[in-house]
Image (tube, coloured by chain):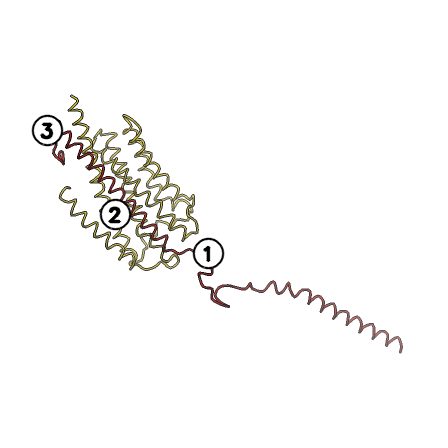
Chain colours: A yellow, B red
Amino acid sequence: MNRLFPVLSVVVAAMFAYAPVMIANAPYESTMGLIQKIFYFHVPVALTMFLAAFVCGIASGVFLFGRRRAADRVAVAAAELVALLGLIVLTSGPLWARKAWGIWWDWDARLTSTLVLWLMFLAYLLLRRYGGPGSERLAAGVALFGMFNVPFVYWSVEFWRTLHPKTSVLPTLQPGMRGPLWFCFAAFLGLFVLLMAARVRLERRRAELEELYLALED
Amino acid sequence: MLSVVRSKVRAGLRCGAAVALTALLLSAGAPAFAGQQPPRTTAAQEGFVPVDELPPEDRLPAAPLLVAAYAIAWVAILAYVWSVWRRLGRVEQELAALGRRAGTGARPGAGE
């Protein structure tokens, strides 16, 4: 990863530099107009957040049942990314809604379940930070629940009547809109890999530091 | 003969009264009919209204919201990158200092 990291950084930076050009050239949506262009960040960030939640949940499961410390480090890194990406989703969404729906927020199924998902991963991070010894196993349980919440969030728009667009929007996108969307998603996937690598490295170095402190005490 | 004239006058009076009553009713009902006319529309039929003359609640430009959404996303991402970088730098420094103390010379990136 050490060799790939700079290469991937350059690729991702170039993709994000080109993304505004693609977004600007994408066709305007007929009813929402300019504000719909939030879509090209909002949806890729939301999908990457779901991926991060899955990575955190699976790694937490491996840590809980397989007792592998490396998996725990991956879980912490992914949980922080869920918190970061969730923050972006939960701020870009209301900014879009204010213009498209005339309101900042609505307590409908999609919005509320996304907020709950985000709060679950904040709870995970708070447990890790302030829970004391053994809290990592408790936090891993929270992460598993968080992961199981993801399909619930995704299909909530199908189960209940909500203001939020349905999942059918993505497969039926016009080609002019499809390109920028998946390009931005690829850029966010690259960013996710980079941030995971950096954050996992931080956890690994912290573990080494702890071992060194213990060795010095002995 | 006189009775015939009287009956014709009465019939004429009745007819006049009926016409007057009808006219009165029609004049009284006119505003009600006028109220059933389609409402005057403001949708650019009788004159164009510049958007800056709309009340503030009807005016909501998309650009500031769009810019805010992208700006918040980038500020959050860059703040997180800076935070990871700073934390990693601090740990690396501490590792190097401890390594020197222990005499083992902890190698940066050891264990990868």
- Number of labelled discs? 3
Name the residue tied to disc 1: B58
Q: Nearer the viewer, mark 2 or mark 3?
A: 3
- Asked whether A57 or A10 is in front, the reply is A10
Q: Badge 2, how many Cα within 10 Å: few under 14, some, many 20+?
A: many
The image shows residue A153 at horizontal and vertical percentages of: 35, 42
**Which residue does the numbered mark 3 point to in the structure image?**
B104
Q: Which of the 4 image quarters holds residue A217? A: top left
Q: Amino acid at mark 2?
A: Phe
Residue type beneath disc 1: Asp
Q: Nearer the viewer, residue A218 or B26?
A: A218
Measured from the top left, where is residue A77 in percent x and y?
25, 37
The reply to whether dot 2 and dot 3 touch (C-beta < 8 Å) is no
Q: Which residue is mark 2?
A: A188
Q: Residue furthest bottom?
A: B1
Cα gap from disc 1 to disc 3, whole angstroms:
70 Å
Position of A100 with respect to B8 (left or right) is: left
